[in-house]
Image: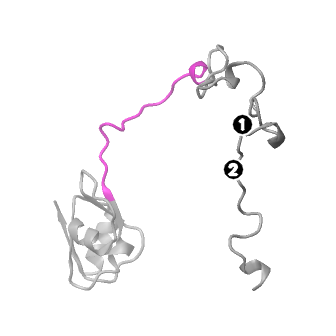
Amino acid sequence: MNIHELSPAPNSTKKARRVGRGIGSGLGKTSGRGQKGQNSRSGGGVRIGFEGGQIPLIRRLPRRGFNNYEFRKQYTIVNVCDLDKLEDGTVVDIALLKDKGIVSKIEKFGLKILGNGELTKKLTVKAAVFTKTAQEKIEKAGGKIEVL
């Protein structure tokens, strides 16, 4: 046995601090919290962002921009290089990609094919949206696209 084979590695684990276990421990009586004040009490302390009553930074800064999260269209995104992993002549839809493990989550608005990478297989791809480059690469490889 060598020193690098020890498990767990030396000094990688540290015992938890046990407070309130007597004066000899060095953390007895007040348990490292001091004598008085808000932080010495149980449940004491201030919330995140609290600045002692001063107007917090988050409220002093102006709000800018527009956020369309509620109404944005979210697609499951796949590149054509990911489709190249499939066999020649396959009919590709979102259910097949989920079964093969190429996508993990099916989004609300369906599948979007992006044109990143190269495609050498002849595939029939069914998706909600295709980018121009993806459409060109699929057709160049001899495949077909079907917009759902």
Q: Circle 1: is it few (<14), some (14-19), or many (20+) Cα within 10 Å?
A: some
In this rendering, the answer to whether 117 lies above or below 107 is below
Kindly identify the residue that appears in the image at 23 percent across and 78 percent down: 123
Relative to the observer, which residue lies in front, 110 or 95? 95
The reply to whether residue 75 is in sight is yes
Residue at mark 2? 16
**Residue 27's spot in the image, x, y percent?**
78, 38
Residue at mark 1? 20
Q: Name the element at disc 2.
A: loop
Mark 2 or 1, closer to the camera: 1
Kindly identify the residue that appears in the image at 29 percent across and 78 percent down: 140
**Residue 13's spot in the image, x, y percent?**
71, 61
In this rendering, the answer to whether 16 lies above or below 90 is above
Q: Name the element at disc 1.
A: loop
Spatial distance from mark 2 to mark 1, Cα to Cα? Answer: 13 Å
Q: Circle 2: is it few (<14), some (14-19), or many (20+) Cα within 10 Å?
A: few
Q: Is residue 75 magenta?
A: yes
**Residue 12's spot in the image, x, y percent?**
72, 63
**Picture quarter with the N terminus:** bottom right
In this rendering, the answer to whether 132 lies above or below 69 is below
Q: Are marks 2 and 1 in contact (CB under 8 Å)?
A: no
**Picture quarter with the C terminus:** bottom left
Main SS category, magenta section: loop
Relative side of 33 to 57, left or right? right
Relative side of 78 to 125, left or right? right
Kindly identify the residue that appears in the image at 57 percent across and 20 percent down: 59
Stretch in magenta: 58-76
